[in-house]
Image (cartoon, rainbow, N blue to C red):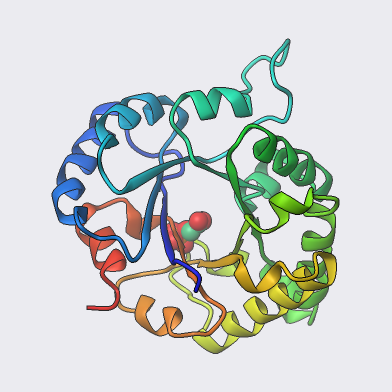
């Protein structure tokens, strides 16, 4: 049985005080929820303050990026150990905005994924095709390349723990969601591809869908066999809508 995850990706939003007041509102409503993992990925600057505030709650903390080296002369970068130290359990890797605006490649995703595991973090590796790639019927080819390239040569103990997020680029922040059928089709393909890399591991790993997830489309998405949660941008910025996503079964 895979435990679902509802993850909020705040991107470059919220100051420390805004982050704190969000958690303050969410905290009591989230108390007692144990059938789903609740995850918030704020900007780096809010991590430490949130770690303090989330203590004793069911809410987990994640970062949006990392660098693969442990320390050294890499101005502006943050290491996996620093994230662990700031209270992170998870880290997003290879988000399409990182690939698009910061030139991240599958090779870089692979280095980051391995470094995250070695520091005791659980990577949430993002994959997804652009609109042009979908229209050119390249969706499966692109996803396969991203999975094989980004997730190659993981240690067996880590291969079982990874989380993969399918986020079609054309659905991110556009209000266009992949239909549950389209999403399920790709999720199933991801599981199959992953199984061919790490036999016996694919059935247990969690696959999240991301791209304009909203309170009114989450239930139908979550009913799909291979969708185990959401990676949510816009709708995770307000406690009310995020709470509705967490309570998608109600
Ligand atoms: P969105 O973003 O929910 O605003 O589409 C999702 C994401 O980029 O993780």
Point out residue 222 in the picture as x, y percentages from the top left corner: 43, 78
**Image position of 160 (left or right of 208):** right
Q: Residue furthest bottom?
A: 181
Q: Is residue 173 visible?
A: no
Residue displayed at 52% across by 75% down: 227
Point out residue 34 in the picture as x, y percentages from the top left corner: 30, 60
**Image position of 122 (left or right of 158):** left
Q: Is residue 13 visible?
A: yes
Quick one: 242 or 211, which is closer to the camera? Answer: 242
Q: Is residue 217 above or below residue 243?
A: below
Residue displayed at 83% across by 45% down: 107
Point out residue 183 in the picture as x, y percentages from the top left corner: 57, 80
Point out residue 162 in the picture as x, y percentages from the top left corner: 64, 55
**Image position of 209 (left or right of 203):** left
Q: Is residue 3 above or below residue 7?
A: below
Residue 118: image quadrant is top right
Q: Is residue 233 above or below residue 62?
A: below
Q: Is residue 133 above or below residue 115?
A: below
Residue displayed at 74% across by 41% down: 114
The C terminus appears in which quarter of the rendering?
bottom left
**Image position of 28 (left or right of 78):** left
Quick one: 48 or 233, which is closer to the camera? Answer: 48
């Amino acid at each position: 049985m895979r435990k679902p995850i509802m993850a909020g990706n705040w991107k470059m939003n919220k100051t420390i005080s805004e982050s704190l007041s969000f958690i303050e509102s969410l905290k009591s409503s989230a108390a007692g929820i144990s059938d789903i993992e609740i995850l918030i990925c704020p900007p780096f600057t809010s991590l430490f303050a949130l770690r303090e505030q989330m203590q004793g709650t069911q809410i987990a903390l994640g970062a949006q990026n990392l660098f693969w080296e442990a320390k050294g002369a890499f101005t502006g970068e943050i290491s996996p150990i620093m994230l662990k130290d700031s209270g992170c359990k998870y880290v997003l890797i290879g988000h399409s905005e990182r690939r698009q605006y910061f030139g991240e490649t599958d090779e870089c995703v692979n280095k980051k994924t391995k470094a995250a595991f070695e520091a005791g973090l659980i990577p949430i590796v993002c994959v997804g095709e652009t609109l042009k790639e979908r229209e050119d019927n390249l969706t499966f080819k692109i996803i396969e390349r991203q999975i094989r390239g980004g997730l190659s040569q993981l240690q067996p103990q880590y291969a079982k723990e990874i989380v993969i997020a399918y986020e079609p680029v054309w659905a991110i922040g556009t209000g266009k969601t992949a239909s549950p059928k389209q999403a399920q089709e790709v999720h199933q393909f991801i599981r199959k591809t992953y199984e061919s890399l790490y036999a016996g591991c694919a059935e247990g790993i969690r696959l999240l869908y991301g791209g304009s997830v909203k309170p009114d489309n989450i239930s139908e998405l979550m009913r799909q066999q291979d969708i185990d949660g959401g990676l949510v941008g816009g709708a995770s910025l307000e406690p009310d809508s995020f709470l509705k996503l967490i309570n998608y079964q109600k």
